[in-house]
Image (cartoon, rainbow, N blue to C red):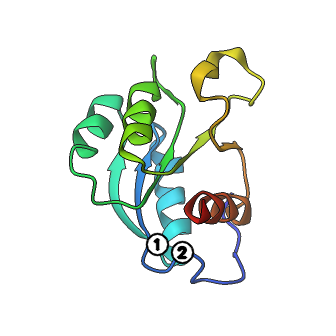
């Protein structure tokens, strides 16, 4: 997934919460975002960790893997929607996949995606 974005300051200073259960993908996402100028304030691999971390909303945007082991990120996504915190779903689930249900209208970036696609999606949700 990792490719240069062209502009390494696309997300300069943006505080990001990352929720991804695959440790390799989590590290890759962290690197991509850091290279784009973002400040990664949380790395979560489980729903429980992510819910606990989201108690202190000190982040501007979140990148959420939809499927976290046997659980989904839906409870966290609903919380972020209530708080007005933008997020994208970075997932292997297709938008038309019925399992995404209530979150199908949220911004979705399907895995695998280029770093440019991921950063563009984050910029789009931040602009809303």
Q: Position of residue 18 (x, y in %)?
A: 43, 51
Residue placed most toward the observer, 81 or 66: 81
Give the image quarter of residue 48.
Answer: top left
| Direction from residue 41 to residue 6 in the image, left or right | right
Residue placed most toward the observer, 111 or 100: 100
Name which residue lies at 29% across and 35% down: 51
Badge 2 density bin: few <14, some 14–19, many ≥20, Cα 10 Å: many
Secondary structure found at label 1: loop
Q: Position of residue 94 (x, y in %)?
A: 74, 30
Number of on-image labels: 2
| Direction from residue 108 to residue 13 in the image, left or right | left
Sequence-first disc among 1 and 2: 2
Tell me the residue that label 2 is attached to.
Answer: 11
In the rendering, which numbered label is found on residue 112?
none
Name which residue lies at 58% across and 41% down: 89
Q: Is residue 69 above or below residue 46?
A: above
Q: Is residue 74 above or below residue 34?
A: above
Q: Position of residue 16 (x, y in %)?
A: 42, 60
Q: Quadrant of the N terminus?
A: bottom right
Secondary structure found at label 2: loop
Q: Position of residue 81 (x, y in %)?
A: 44, 39
Q: Is residue 108 above or below residue 28?
A: above
Name which residue lies at 74% across and 30% down: 95
Distance from the alpha carbon under mark 1 to that under mark 2: 5 Å
Give the image quarter of residue 60.
Answer: bottom left
Q: Quadrant of the C terminus?
A: bottom right
Badge 1 density bin: few <14, some 14–19, many ≥20, Cα 10 Å: many
Residue placed most toward the observer, 51 or 71: 51
Mark 1 vs 2: CB contact within 8 A: yes
| Direction from residue 94 to residue 43 in the image, left or right | left
Tell me the residue that label 1 is attached to.
Answer: 38
Name which residue lies at 60% across and 65% down: 127
């Amino acid at each position: 997934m990792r490719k240069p974005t062209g502009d390494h300051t696309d997300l300069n200073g943006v505080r990001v919460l990352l929720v991804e259960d695959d440790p390799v993908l989590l590290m890759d996402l962290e690197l991509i975002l850091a290279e784009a100028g973002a400040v990664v304030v949380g790395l979560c691999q489980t729903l429980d960790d992510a819910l606990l971390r989201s108690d202190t909303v000190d982040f501007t945007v979140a990148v959420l893997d939809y499927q976290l082991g046997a659980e989904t990120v839906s409870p966290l996504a609903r919380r972020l929607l209530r708080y007005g915190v933008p997020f994208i779903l970075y997932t292997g689930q297709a938008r038309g996949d019925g399992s995404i249900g209530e979150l199908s209208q949220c911004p979705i970036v399907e895995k695998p995606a280029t770093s440019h696609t991921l950063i563009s999606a984050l910029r789009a949700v931040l602009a809303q």
